[in-house]
Amino acid sequence: MAIPVPEKRIAKFEKLGFGMFIHWGLYSQLGRGEWVQFIEKIPKEEYAKLKDTFTAKEFNGREIAKIAKRAGMNYITLTTRHHEGFSLYDTRGLNDYDAPHSPAGRDLIKDFVEGCRAEGILPMFYHTTLDWYNDDFNGNFKEYLKYLRRSVEILCTEYGEIGGLWFDGNWSKPNDDWEEDELYGLIRRNQPDAMIINNTGLDARGFVGNSYLDSVTFEQGRPTPMNREGMPKYLAAEMCQTINGHWGIGTIDFNYQSLPELIENLCACRKVGANYLLNVGPTAEGKILPLQAELLAAVGDWIRATGDAIYNGKPCDIKASGKDFVLFDGEKYWFYIHDLTIKAQDNVVKGVAGVGPRSFTDAKVPFKSIKWVDNGEELKFTQNTKNGLLCVDCTGYPYGTNMVVRVAVADAL
């Protein structure tokens, strides 16, 4: 069966490749994650007092966009409203539980969008569908859905063209009618080029939902290859993941992913054509922690050292064993090689496992050269185009270097 052609917005989204997720709200003042109100059973009236101390004095949309740009990220998805029900945008009379009615005194989404545009970053909006603040969520669900749609309409009409809407929370009422067609139809009318995404949660990664949706989600789990044959619509895929153990800031959370893990996670996503949406949790005042910013910057350094195929390359017919994979950008083939070691004397480096031949199948395009991107070294290879077998002699890293995942580029004859 045929694979459908992706709509323009979906094809554009796939090429973005790498994005920043930001969870920030009233919960950031407590520093115990974004679910603190629910987990610690904090009464709504008591929790709502956090609005009175929400200053956002260090929130700067352009500075955040600069951090994302430095990291090689092309879009940012920010929590305009999380499950706590507090909005970072001006709700224009829907209620006063928003940033303009707090000590922040300003529309933070406006600041965010302007900052993204100044740095060439695509702004996208996360918006909760469940709500711990609005009593209608459990008391009069149909009325709540009207409130939700009015909230989303503000986001679709007051901030210019946006990259998309990213929803989260339908899993909280799996047996209820969320009137999704009305919500998504509203978006499509006002933002025809916006991605529409609704997170299916930890237990339903990769699930295909409503026909309006443009991407499946993989929360906190590496994506699997999508079989799009016979699908009525081409869908993108995106993995969202925390940089440590929380989405919102955890001030006593030191369990950060390492730089090699982040690089390998990005590669694992692009191996199957999925985007990588990596989350940071700003401080109570809205600043991204220096540790997080530096980790992201180092990922950006890796991207710049390995070429832009991580964005433009797509999975191709050539198959590799283990974690290795090949992308094709329409002109060249890019080989992503894992677990190489450094080549040096035995008294300097222990072990040389991983250095040597790597095999590939279905490589029926004849190659004239294969070389490392980082230093231009030509690699020896043997190829049988009839049966598609390819063997590349993958040399180790020069002493003093290690790319974690090393990239070679191949030119076809």
Image (cartoon, rainbow, N blue to C red):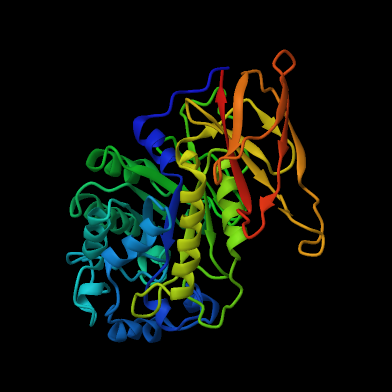
The residue nearer to you, when weighing 17 against 136, is 17
Image coordinates of residue 279 in percent, x first then y, are 47, 62
Q: Quadrant of the N terminus?
A: top right
Q: Quadrant of the C terminus?
A: top right
The residue nearer to you, when weighing 209 against 308, is 308
Image coordinates of residue 74 in percent, x first then y, are 38, 50
Left or right for 2, reference 23: right
Left or right for 74, reference 295: left
The residue nearer to you, when weighing 181 against 329, is 329
Q: Quadrant of residue 270?
A: top right
Q: Quadrant of residue 182?
A: top left
- Furthest residue in direction top, as rendered: 386
How many marks do you count on the picture? 0
Residue at image x 33%, y 65%? 64
Image coordinates of residue 250 in percent, x first then y, are 51, 78
Residue at image x 34%, y 59%? 144
Query: Is the residue 212 above or below the residue 90 in the image?
Result: above
Left or right for 175, reference 344: left
Image coordinates of residue 153 in percent, x first then y, are 24, 52
Left or right for 134, reference 239: left
The answer, for residue 216, to whether it is visible in the render is: no
The answer, for residue 2, to whether it is visible in the render is: yes
Query: Is the residue 185 above or below the residue 289 in the image?
Result: above
Residue at image x 44%, y 75%? 290
